[in-house]
Amino acid sequence: MNKGMLISLLVIGFAVALPTSAEEFQNPKANIPPKAAPQRRNAGEGFPPLPLPATPLRRSEKKREPSPPALVGNITFSETAAKKAGLTWETTIIDIEKWVNFTNDQLGQRYRFVGTDFSKFSYDPTELPIIYFTGWKPLPDFDDATIAKMRQYLMDGGTWVVHSNCGRPEFNQSFKQQIKRIFPDRELAAIPTDHPIFQAFHKITTMRVRKGKEPWVTIPPVLETINIGTRAAVIFSPIDLSCGWDANANPIEGGVLYDQGDALKLGANIVTYCLAEYQYARFFDHQKVYHQADDKTRDQLVLGQLVHNGDWDATPHGLPNLLKTMDQSTTLHVQFKRVPVDPEKADLFSFPVIYMSGQRSFKFSDAAVKRLREYLDNGGTLVVDCVIGSSEFDTAFKAAIKQIYPDREMKDLQADHPIMNFVYDERKVNLAPLGKQLDPSIHSPQLKAIEVDGTIRVIYSPLSMSAGWEQLPRAYDKGYSDEDSLKLGVNILMYVVSH
């Protein structure tokens, strides 16, 4: 059973016994007023440079800025919009108050939250990098203008943190409907326990959760995300992040809540993750994609990029940057181009080299497995990159290649293989900071391959190359340094083109 299925079963198991009507459920958290009314604003002051590194340091000194920067916006519906939709919408403040205060204490910062609504919000991530949203009733349909603005805010680098107050299924279902309207082309899916969110500040492998007055149960942490590039831009908890509510002393009938201590640690991790990814988020949507000049004297080598359901294009700027580097650093007088390829279709055979990347679990259809085997047996080459060193993709790809070649094993390429110094001498490499921190013993490329009749047909890098190809400020890359990523990529593509 994969991680996504396990999480779905856990959440369903907690929710099945809850009342299905929002009118039947009374939320005691809704009756607690904020300690201090949050400030409202919709534009004006900009967000200052973020002080935290990817792995924040605990600080003993206290900052004394006269006006702490607003980091999180508690966003909801305006009274006018609520009346127009025919609903009495309610939200709570106690969780965000405790969450922001606890996180400030943990990180040694003085951030604050502000109140806003969808009609007043500026949709500018430089003013509010994080927006927070919670509820327990079914959501109304967002209007088309709000859908477009929310999508742009998230694409421009903002992060939307959403949690289900009391873990109510009617809220969960309605939120998933609205997020599907915002991102019909992206999947809201569970993340594994080794995701950076669960290790950004506190190392979280399990959390305690309680349904009503039933005994506490320990489960893996449950979060679902929508990714933009390699960043989790929407972070959704279908279980109540009960930062301001002690479900141990005050259980809620009809509620599903995390333990308060566990929830606060997870909240601190979420803020840390968002801060660490802020610069990457701001650069991502504005990165220029390289287009080679139209030079008719050149032959054209077209690379196919395999389309699949595991975030197949999480590093869209990577391959163009690599091809630009090849053009500038080699004597191969070839014009390069990439084209998305469906593995089930016959045009697969038009490409001498197929590139594949991903960061989530995926599965090939039987038709795709058969066609890929035919492609490789007839001289094609598959170059595969595990984006940011994702464990989900790594597990899924190893299972998929076993379906394609059940009779062959991927073997490690040794440091003396010709690929390692085909153009550049890459027998020794440096890793990105996080990769170096996780395994300082790695000093040579970690490549795996399958050979057919003495020729390499599959090359797989479990450490990310494409994240380095993008040359963006990325905090959570378990791969090679930018420079070595590009050089190693040039070596691999030049080798397979030449062989």
Image: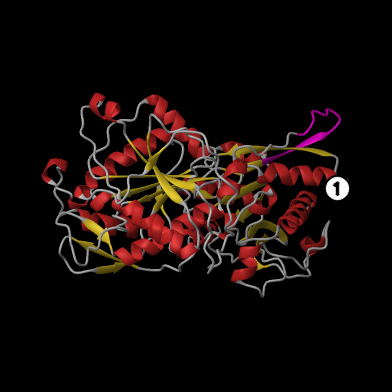
How many tags in the picture?
Answer: 1
**Badge 1 amino acid:** Thr
Q: Which residue does the numbered mark 1 point to in the structure image?
A: 330
Measured from the top left, where is residue 234 in percent x and y? 43, 46
Measured from the top left, where is residue 365 in percent x and y? 46, 47
Q: Is 307 left or right of 84, judged from the image as shown?
A: right
In percent of the image, x 58 and y 52: which residue is there? 50
Residue 102 in view here? yes
In percent of the image, x 35 and y 26: which residue is there? 143
Residue furthest toward the right?
A: 331
**Quarter of the N terminus within the rendering:** bottom left
Measured from the top left, where is residue 49 in percent x and y? 60, 49
Nearest to the observer: residue 422 or residue 199: 199
Residue furthest toward the bottom?
A: 441
Q: In which quadrant of the rendered view does residue 173 lie?
A: top left
Residue 419, above or below 21: below
Measured from the top left, where is residue 495 in percent x and y? 78, 54
- Magenta stretch bounds: 292-303
The 10 Å Cα crowd at callout 1, few under 14, some 14 to 19, many 20 or more, is few
Residue 392 in view here? no
